[in-house]
Amino acid sequence: MSDAHLPSVDRELRRQLARGAALPGPLPLPDHEQLWTALGDAVEGGKRLRPALLLSAHAALGGTRHEAAVQVGAALELLHTAFVVQDDVIDGDEVRRGVPSVPGGAAAQAARHGATPAGARRLGQAAGILAGDLGLITAMRTISRCEAPAPVVEGLLDLFETTLHATAAGELADVRLQLAPAADPAPLREVLAVAELKTALYSFQLPLRAGALLAEAPSEVHSALDEIGSLLGIGFQLVDDLLGTFGDAQRTGKSALGDLREGKRTALIAHASTTETWPALQSLLGRADLDDHDASRARDLLTACGSRAWVEDLAHWHLTSASEAALRHGLPAALSDALEATTAQILRGVELTLPGPAHPSAGTAPPRAKEDQPA
Amino acid sequence: MSDAHLPSVDRELRRQLARGAALPGPLPLPDHEQLWTALGDAVEGGKRLRPALLLSAHAALGGTRHEAAVQVGAALELLHTAFVVQDDVIDGDEVRRGVPSVPGGAAAQAARHGATPAGARRLGQAAGILAGDLGLITAMRTISRCEAPAPVVEGLLDLFETTLHATAAGELADVRLQLAPAADPAPLREVLAVAELKTALYSFQLPLRAGALLAEAPSEVHSALDEIGSLLGIGFQLVDDLLGTFGDAQRTGKSALGDLREGKRTALIAHASTTETWPALQSLLGRADLDDHDASRARDLLTACGSRAWVEDLAHWHLTSASEAALRHGLPAALSDALEATTAQILRGVELTLPGPAHPSAGTAPPRAKEDQPA
């Protein structure tokens, strides 16, 4: 990963945020300031994973448009922030990364000023939708102004637009997936298809291919990067699902009760529904009043029936296959090194934030394959 | 108005919709199809007011970039549709123009497939937010690809982006305005400021100035158009407020109970709150269970205390001042003619859809000034 260049991405983000703050003109416009500050704060919380991937791919493929890569990297971070903010509206999440989400923060502020709970919620939703709109537009504008020749910019905008269409479909598919009755778990195939559409495309394929476009890499590199991005993205989503159920809330910034209370359709649940543990587990899922004791019991069941180890294996397989695909397609060694570093970073996330199973039943779980591989 | 050219705008919209439908690739993606079809249906329902204004301004100012004007006009209709769709999410409106709104339609479909009411509402919100995002992005992309020289396109994108920032602030300000307790009506100044930010900028100033940019009109024309757009936009919003309370639901496509039930802060209410009728009226506003009889009584009170006539006068004044400003600034006669036609169209809306006061108390209302002027 070109982590060394991430300060340039942060500088570019600050430049875009300063530019946007001044756009409506010299008169103070408190509602604009609120939206824009909230978006800026949400940008602050990001890990710059997507710009780092873009910069790595661009450099590894011999690209020399460093300035444009930084600009497009900043645009991808803005796009990610816009998705996160609107996702929090859709999911009704009031906390993100351990601090109030954009809709949660705006709603809390309105409530402090005397709004009713319904009124505060509505203002929060409006703030999230509108801040997201401004983030999207700023991302697209940043790409359209980046310092690259017109045909390259055109290619980047095509990729951006296509990715947005597919990601929107993935986001809707994910909401739909979660609507099915708790008794009716989604098959793994569907869970993985949604992960690809909703996460892999914009978080992995888009940065990798944007780097390749800026480096003017040949078309076979693009198809290899699509395959790699899909593997990485699905692996990343599987790790995220593991963290959502087994993660340490102190480190992940989100409660490990949320997914269980929602009865969220993840690969964990898809696997568990095919085991004999399912009837016992099912009665615990999707209960809004699930307490810590029941959550612990659900985690124990998911561990005992092998679902946790199975999803960990599946995540490892996707992530390591991504690096292997880079070698198989003959991509430059610098790129497979960068992908291995990304994989290691994602897997490090698991080790850092997955506390070991808290109950003695953990002893009955199958061995956690590949857990000892170098990360 | 260049109504004769509106079929070209419809053709361009169909072209953009066909292009977007094909973007995610050859595999069927039902969630994308649903989002994109919903956006397309919402585009169908529009009146092309903004493209017509753009085409008129462009032609009247001697512009010859007809093709680009049609493309940017189509983009403004897409932008308007995106705002409408996301506005329906924010306001929880399930009906728009007499048919299900995008969130309302998606929620109803999910309910038919067995979703719980909360689940269906969530899916509807997601569909509205995401379809709006795609509309915004497509609008911006259509402008960035329009057939005009690069500096003109850059100017158009700057204008688009600036307008979007201010409109988002206006939308949030409007939601905030509606949160105040019913006993605390907003002053007229605030109602008009929100109307300018939320409506005038994107619906009037943006199309007029986009036409001027394409015609490469000098900067003094732009400041005149800003003044004109602000007057037209506020007048338009005032007419919309009148229709929201006194309109014929059969013709406006929205219930004339909604604004009263919400206790919406409009110029009507700002005026009424300064009259002796206010205590009697106030007790009827913001009641979710308001029935036809009470609504009739509220309308009678608004008529009797002179608020209706006063807002009608205020709307007329704004609309006619717009045409007068065009003359005063020495803009081409074709442009003032076009503005007068727009004004007449907006005022015709009032006459067509405002049934006369239904109760005898109407006789006590002040004379409806300017109502007999040629429209």
Image: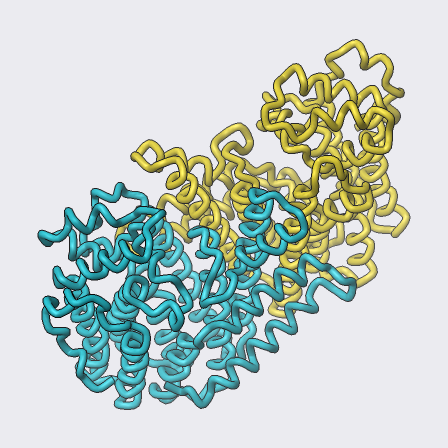
Chain colours: A yellow, B cyan
State how many labels appear: 0
- Position of residue A206 relative to residue A153, above or below, is above
Q: Is residue B295 left or right of residue B147?
A: left
Q: Which of these two is toward me, B326 or B96?
A: B96
- Position of residue B269 relative to residue B20, above or below, is above
Whether residue A374 is visible: no
Q: Quadrant of the C terminus of chain A?
A: top right
- Residue name at image x 35 percent, y 34 percent: A111
Q: Quadrant of residue A24?
A: bottom left
Pinpoint residue B264: horizontal percent, then vertical percent. Answer: 30, 53
Q: Quadrant of the N terminus of chain A?
A: top right
Q: Which of these two is toward me, A375 or A2?
A: A375
Pinpoint residue A73: horizontal percent, then vertical percent. Answer: 60, 49
Q: Is residue B23 left or right of residue A324?
A: left
Pinpoint residue B369: horizontal percent, then vertical percent. Answer: 13, 75
Q: Which of these two is toward me, A231 or B357?
A: B357
